[in-house]
Amino acid sequence: MKKNKTGKYLKYAIGEIVLVMIGILLALQVNEWNNEKNRNKAEKAIIEQLKIELVTSKIQLEKLIESQEESAEASAIICHSFWKNKIPHDSIIDYMRRPLGNTVYSPVLGTAKSLINSGNLSLIKSNTLKNAITVYVERVESSLKDINRYEETYYRRGIEIINEVIPVAALGSKSQLKDYIKKSNSPSFETSRNDKFSARPNVIEKIPFETDLEQLFQDKRIYLTYSLLLVAHRNATSRYYAILNNINELLKKLEQNTE
């Protein structure tokens, strides 16, 4: 009887093994499907976050570029005035004040850098897109180094020089300062500025430092100041444009990847 049942037991055992193997393979396949679904979901979330950061940076950069260009143009106007016969009008003061402020901007790199540093860049299936993200971060960081160098080498040096010539806080035309004196002494003049910790009081009795344009536009230090500021803002603008182009290129690749 045992001999007669051996074949049946063998077939039964093989059948059981086959069923178990099929079950395991199905389980593995289902697990792989779930993993692929999760990877696709993670990749989609990453791409959407990248898009948000890039668009935010793009909007902020466009505004900054406009401001940097205005500062560079104002510095150029000051420099050009040294090459003309006539002493500039009081309105030139407005151009002199414009380049004295500066903003160094860094676009949002959180998601892109996190992907690279954490090794999660592998979640992006497209090798072309992975390479584009890496190149984007490298190019932006290179441009930011250049911008910081312009800040240190040109902008700060320009501000140091002009502060040796004239207090920036007092840089204003006679008509502007006289108008402010008139307003500050008026009973109806109101201000919310607390002058306790301010270099300039709310009520002005006299002009402490009058801006003599004829004298200023004979001073080579002023010319050097605005030459330095011009280089700082002009060169920074070119690097910000480069970053903006990098942003647009990566955005385009991200859009293509989701089509």
Image (cartoon, helix red, strand yellow):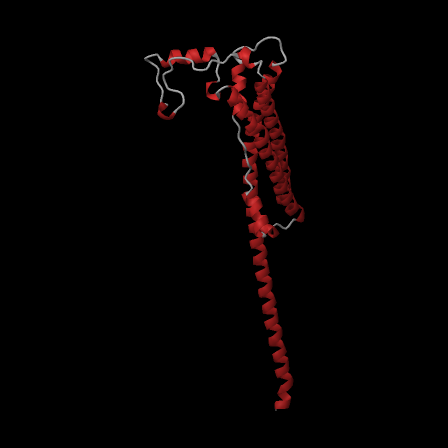
Residue 194 seen from this side: no
Foreground: 251 or 100? 100
Q: Indicate the quadrant containing the N terminus: top left, top right, bottom left or bottom right.
A: bottom right
Residue 8 seen from this side: yes
Residue 190 at x, y = what percent?
35, 18
Foreground: 52 or 89? 89
In screen coordinates, is 177 left or right of 227?
A: left
* Displayed quadrant of residue 194: top left
Outermost residue toward the left in this view = 187
Outermost residue toward the top in this view = 86
Residue ID at (61%, 90%): 2
Residue 16 at x, y = what percent?
60, 76
Query: Exactly how many numbered labels are in the figure?
Result: 0
Foreground: 98 or 113? 98
In this picture, is 221 found above or below 4?
A: above
In this picture, is 7 found above or below 15?
A: below
Residue 147 at x, y = what percent?
59, 33
Residue ID at (62%, 87%): 5
Q: Indicate the quadrant containing the C terminus: top left, top right, bottom left or bottom right.
A: top right
In this picture, is 183 found above or below 257?
A: above
Residue ID at (65%, 84%): 7
Residue ID at (58%, 53%): 39
